[in-house]
Image (cartoon, rainbow, N blue to C red):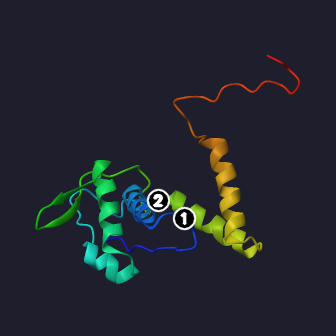
Amino acid sequence: MVDYRIDRRSGVATYLQIVQQTEQALRLGLLAPGDKLPTAREVVEATAVNPNTVLKAYRELEREGLVEARRGLGTFVRRSLGAAPADSPLRAELEDWASRAREAGLEREDVAALFTAVLETHHPVRTSDPAPPKTPQGDPS
């Protein structure tokens, strides 16, 4: 089961935090097809968010084809994401790296920025519509 943690200072909408945390649990293999998500009431009790927010997140996950609502039974995982199990050796290496970064005095934001920069180098975001090329300053074309 997934335990949702809501960061009200993150600037990310609460329903999106629930969606993102569910997707992360799917990627890590913490949730698998057939697993039941917590009920909206359980999420509300654990996080003190509005029930409609939880339902909106679950509808978004359903729209993405990741979960399905079964009337009177709950919401169940339809499919998983990715292939990065929680017990992967890579996770252990990343845990070690994060520990060393903390010991080196890096703050959470520093670690996130460093990791994101490296991630972008090795896994750049691909868009279907590339940005138009920039023209040099002073070039009238």
**In x, y percent, where is residue 82?**
41, 49
Query: The C terminus lies in which quarter of the figure?
Result: top right
**Residue at position x 36%, y 58% from top?**
26
Q: Which mark is residue 38?
A: none
Q: Quadrant of residue 84?
A: bottom left
Q: Which mark is residue 92?
A: 1
**In x, y percent, where is residue 120?**
64, 45
**Residue at position x 12%, y 63% from top?**
71
Q: Is residue 132 left or right of residue 28?
A: right
Residue for badge 2: 88
**Residue at position x 58%, y 67% from top?**
95
* Marks 2 and 1 close (CB-CB < 8 Å): yes
View extreme (left): residue: 72
**In x, y percent, where is residue 70?**
14, 60
View extreme (top): residue: 141
Question: Given the image, on which type of amino acid does mark 2 rest?
Answer: Ser
